[in-house]
Image (cartoon, rainbow, N blue to C red):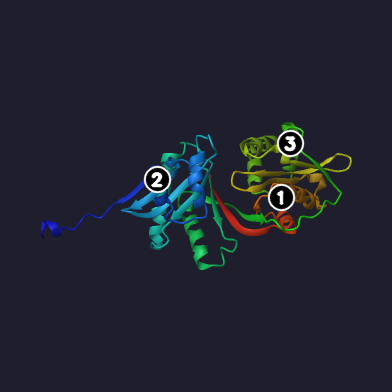
Amino acid sequence: MDRDQAVKPMPSLSIRPITGREELSLFTRLPYVLDEELADDLVQGRRRPEWMWVAVLGDRLLARAAWWGRQGDATPVVLDVLDVDDSLPAPDRTDIGVRLLRTAMAATLPNGSPPPEYSRLIPPDWRDGTTSRRIVEDRMAILERTGARLFVERLRLEWRPGTPIPEPSGRLTFRPPHNHPEMAALMTRALDGTLDAHSRHSLTRMSADAVATRHYEDELARYPSPKEWWRIAMLPDAEPVGFVIPAHNGYNAIIAYIAVLPEHRGKRYVDDILAEGTRVLARQNIPRVRASTDLGNVPMAHAFERAGYIVFGREINMTWT
């Protein structure tokens, strides 16, 4: 065979982190709903190039994975991007995804600690469509091959301006919390009988006080929005009934946390409390209010529905044990 006609070697699969923002165009060749946030996340320090991995064959992107973390954190807190080229044959999709994820996890995550939770934002009716179901189940299959298991499915909810907010019923009054200890004490009490899967899991490993403290310090206290938005709901005699934490997480206005204390459940106080939280955010002239709750937390899902929130998506959470 003439040297000029020799067969060129096939390129091998390259698995690596991106070099920086200049490779976002490569990283986003596989589409996902979070793509529009990636550039700003890199600027704000919520993502790092070394947390964003690709599997490339020649110039073709076959798979990608990325973690998200809070600004200033040394390690990421959630794996929220995992995609494969859906035009690949089924076995190849899974195998390449597994190779990518195992390589990226070994290089990115601390030794000896469980990997951060996986989160996938999905359509509300994802089980009804052949394509949407296959996309979700393909990603889940990749994660299962690395030892992850389904933890919970959640509803993603949205209130939009123009949706009526119920007028105050007069049953409750509202005020911001006096201080951190007061808020932490109410959060601890609210964990009794909780239906939230994450809280219930945490309670198997820690005391209620420790769970509330971690939730406050690791999430709620870090929101950039003012704590003056937070509301404690009280009866006319000033006895606390529950609370709501309206906030902005840097992406959207959200109902970050809402709870009714155990002794006051079953009286639909949640409707008054959710309306107040929504009212606080609506005054900020925001384009939407987002919230989420477990698929299995039927009472809370019904409360959001009564308040005019729509289910615009779902979320899959998977964990490693």
**First in sequence: mark 1 vs mark 3:** 3
Residue 263 percent location from the top left of the image: 82, 45
Q: Residues within 10 Å of mark 1 (few under 14, many from 20)?
A: some
Mark 3 Cα shell of 10 Å, populated few (<14), some (14-19), many (≥20)? some
Any part of residue 40 in sight:
yes
Task: From the image, tell me which residue sits under label 1.
Answer: 282
**315 shown above or below 256:** below
In this figure, which residue is indicated by the disc labeled 2?
A: 22
Sequence-first disc among 3 and 2: 2
The amino acid beneath tag 1 is Ala
Measured in 3D between alpha carbons, the distance from the residue under mark 3 to the one under mark 2, in whole angstroms, is 44 Å
Kindly report which numbered mark, 1 or 3, lies closer to the viewer in this rendering: 1
| Horizontal arrangement in the rendering, residue 10 relative to residue 292 (left or right) | left
Q: Nearer the viewer, residue 262 or 274?
A: 274
Give the quadrant of residue 87. Answer: bottom left
The three-letter code of the residue at mark 3 reads: Met
Q: Do the residues labelled 2 and 1 touch (CB within 8 Å)?
A: no
Residue identified by numbered label 3: 183
